[in-house]
Image (spheres, rainbow, N blue to C red):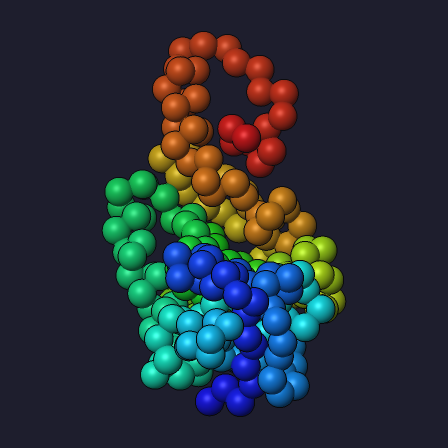
Amino acid sequence: MADAAIYLRAGREKSVLTRHPWIFASAIDHVEGTPGLGDTVLVFDSKKKFLAKAAYSPSSQIRSRVWTLMENVEIDCSFLEQRIKASINRRAGLKESENTDALRLIYGEADGIPGLVVDQYANTLVMQLLSAGAEKFRDEIIDILAEHLKPEQIYERSDVEIRLLEGMQPRDGLAWGNKMDHAITISENGLKYLVDVTEGQKTGFYIDQRRNRQKVFELAKDKQVLNCFCYTGGFT
């Protein structure tokens, strides 16, 4: 249960009420208690009306990231498991419909898990923890992913400078599993790509360009095409 609280300045509750997940430092009037990095805090408006539960980041301009707008929901392992399972289930049919085994399974705030990004490359998961709240539950997140997706390995690519703004050091390396294949073979629209999940851009591949690659494939049929900037051999 959260034992600290933040109170917003008058009029600054509007973004929370419209479901924006970020609360900036400039919106906060005062803090009760001494919440640490990633701790859950209660969020109240200037009239002491409950607004949300959020993860606190004492050194970031994004001072809190909203977990839920429901006061009776506990932010714990069960909460995270429900959110992670829901994210995975939303994408359950994409492997077949998009003809690929490379997918973004969790996309942070869009899936109600601020700061957590998880991409799947065949039997490998690549994870980024970009917020204090996600970092707080790192071990629980890894266990949930391993249990529900049963990957061969989980590799962490929390090696971005945004972590410094959250008061955290960048980190990368094998987070779960006994071995790590640096080059992962994925399949997309009948083609094979080698993805370097340890050194490649982002988490290793521009997954969001899948349909653009398919379009270029169709346009380039029976033609000679020079691809001057062909990161991993795909359209970028």
- Can residue 140 be seen here? The reply is no
Give coordinates of residue 64: x percent, y percent.
57, 68
Total number of numbered labels? 0
Give coordinates of residue 81: x percent, y percent.
38, 75
Give coordinates of residue 4: x percent, y percent.
56, 85
Q: At 53% from the left edge and 50% from the top edge, which residue is drawn? A: 184
Q: At 31% from the left edge and 54% from the top edge, which residue is drawn? A: 91
Give coordinates of residue 116: x percent, y percent.
51, 63
Considering only vertical position in the picture, is 30 above or below 110?
A: below
User: Which of the pair 142/64 is nearer the observer?
Assistant: 64
Q: Quadrant of the C terminus?
A: top right
User: Which of the pair 200/74 is nearer the observer?
Assistant: 74
Name the side, left or right, on which 34 lies relative to 115: right
User: Which of the pair 168/175 is nearer the observer?
Assistant: 168
- Can residue 101 be seen here? The reply is yes
Q: At 50% from the left edge and 10% from the top edge, which residue is drawn? A: 224
Q: Quadrant of residue 170?
A: bottom right
Considering only vertical position in the picture, is 234 above or below 47?
A: above
Considering only vertical position in the picture, is 71 above or below 236?
A: below
User: Which of the pair 81/57 is nearer the observer?
Assistant: 57
